[in-house]
Image (cartoon, rainbow, N blue to C red):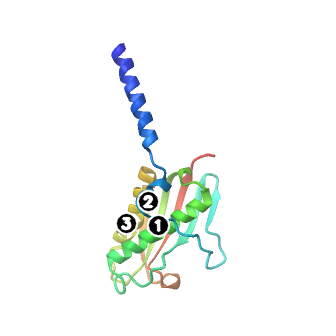
């Protein structure tokens, strides 16, 4: 019985120390040397996000990186464009929630790559976004995803990404 109580005590203490060391998404971004950008205004008649119940739907976001992947940009440059888009999406999530810790989980991601008709590495490009979400949010950042190629995107941006996240109850 004493062994069981001792084991429970050790597990409880370990759990407490793990939760104390847990980092918020904001702390992880800071540790990574990444800064959340300002949220820009929509370029047309729409809103950046819409909350329905505890689901938050984000409008498509894209980086200030332009051109077609497969012609103007390499897969690696496309990956960096998707990663930059990830930072913009994090900024929108922060503006929408006030606290990135409110994100319970990423549910669905649609990644669109402005690409040549022959280009077939869309998943490798959108991994720039997915990898960043897992780095910042851990398991909560894993998501279902589609990565598709498109003939053009607004203002010739390299990628555009839409996100649906589930929020923790307030």
* Mark with earlier residue (2, 1): 1
User: Which callout, 2 or 3, points at the residue further toward the start of the chain?
Assistant: 3
Q: CA distance from mark 2 to mark 1?
A: 7 Å
Does the image show residue 143?
A: no
Q: Which mark is residue 86?
A: 1
Labels 2, 3: front one? 2
Q: Residue at x 49, y 50 (%)?
A: 24
Residue marked by disc 3: 127
Residue shown at the point (50%, 74%) measured from the top left: 62
User: Across the whole image, how many numbered discs are drawn on residues?
Assistant: 3
Q: Residue at x 38, y 29 (%)?
A: 11
Q: Secondary structure at mark 2?
A: helix
Q: Position of residue 10 (x, y in %)?
A: 37, 26
| Left or right, 48 with reference to 132 | right
Q: Which mark is residue 133?
A: 2
Which badge, 3 or 1, comes first in the chain's sequence? 1
Residue lying at 43% horizontally and 59% vertically, measured from the top left: 133
Cβ atoms under marks 2 and 1 closer than 8 Å: yes
């Amino acid at each position: 019985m004493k062994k069981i109580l001792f084991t429970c005590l050790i597990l409880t203490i370990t759990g407490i120390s793990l939760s104390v060391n847990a980092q918020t998404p904001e702390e992880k971004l800071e540790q990574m040397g990444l800064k959340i950008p300002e949220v820009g205004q929509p370029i047309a008649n729409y809103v950046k996000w819409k909350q329905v119940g505890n689901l938050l739907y984000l409008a498509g976001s894209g980086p200030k990186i332009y051109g077609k992947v497969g012609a103007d940009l390499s897969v690696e440059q496309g990956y960096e464009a998707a990663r930059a888009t990830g930072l913009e999406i994090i900024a929108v999530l922060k503006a929408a929630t006030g606290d990135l810790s409110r994100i319970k989980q990423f549910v669905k991601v649609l990644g669109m790559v402005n690409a040549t008709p022959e280009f077939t590495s869309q998943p490798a490009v959108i991994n720039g976004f997915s990898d960043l979400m897992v780095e910042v949010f851990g398991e909560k950042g894993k998501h279902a995803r589609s990565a598709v190629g498109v003939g053009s995107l607004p203002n010739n941006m390299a990628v555009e990404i839409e996100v649906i996240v589930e929020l923790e109850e307030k």
